[in-house]
Image: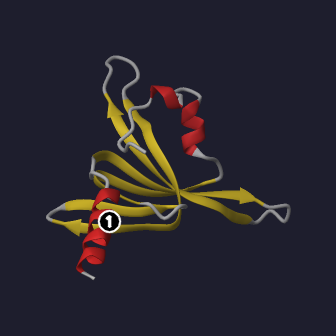
């Protein structure tokens, strides 16, 4: 019995991911316009943005990583910091400490739009998967 408990504890410990400090965390809800001209939610995603300061051009936020989520996010305020926790579609839990947080609703995918200028290979991810 003790061995089984230790195995579960070690297994859970190995699944933990380091908690990065993120410049901007966005919970984005993407909607599509139906034939009846109503809005229907397609999916929600967490987008992690990194601030780049390459003066005099290219200053601003760039997508570092994104994750489609079905459960939304939990925002925990602790000691003046925002800790954002979410799960991806496979159930893997992630969390990040965010300098800023915003929730948006769009009829387009901001992460896909960002790929046109900042391809996946150019990004520096916060998590290793």
The residue located at (27%, 48%) in the rendering is 20
Quadrant of the image occupied by residue 14: bottom left
Measured from the top left, where is residue 100 in percent x and y?
31, 52
The residue most toward the right is 35
Q: Is residue 100 above or below residue 52?
A: below
Query: 89 or 58, which lies in front?
Result: 89
Query: 127 or 27, which lies in front?
Result: 127
For disc 1, the marked residue is 12
Measured from the top left, where is residue 55 in percent x and y?
31, 18
Q: Is residue 124 left or right of residue 31?
A: left
Quadrant of the image occupied by residue 89: bottom right
Q: Is residue 118 above or below residue 90?
A: above
Secondary structure under tag 1 reads: helix
Query: 43 or 95, which lies in front?
Result: 95
Quadrant of the image containing the C terminus = top left
Measured from the top left, where is residue 21 in percent x and y?
26, 47
Q: How is the image coloured?
A: secondary structure
The residue most toward the top is 56
The residue most toward the bottom is 1
User: In the rendered picture of this protein, how many numbered marks are placed on residues?
Assistant: 1
Q: Is residue 93 left or right of residue 34?
A: left
Quadrant of the image containing the N terminus = bottom left
Q: Residues within 10 Å of mark 1 (few under 14, many from 20)?
A: few
The residue located at (32%, 65%) in the rendering is 12
Q: Is residue 31 left or right of residue 49?
A: right
Query: 68 or 76, which lies in front?
Result: 68
Q: Is residue 89 above or below residue 110?
A: below
Measured from the top left, where is residue 82 in percent x and y?
26, 60
């Amino acid at each position: 019995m003790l061995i089984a408990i230790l195995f579960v504890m070690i297994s859970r410990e190995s699944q933990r991911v380091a908690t990065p400090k993120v410049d901007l965390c966005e919970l984005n809800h993407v909607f599509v316009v139906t034939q009846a001209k109503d809005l229907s939610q397609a999916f929600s995603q967490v987008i992690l943005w990194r601030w780049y300061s390459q003066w005099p051009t290219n200053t601003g936020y760039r997508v570092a990583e994104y994750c489609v989520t079905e459960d939304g996010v939990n925002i925990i305020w602790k000691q003046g910091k925002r800790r954002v926790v979410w799960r991806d579609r496979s159930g893997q839990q992630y969390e990040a400490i965010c300098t800023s947080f915003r929730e948006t609703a769009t009829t387009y995918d901001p992460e896909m739009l960002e790929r046109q200028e900042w391809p996946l290979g150019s990004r520096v991810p916060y998590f290793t998967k």
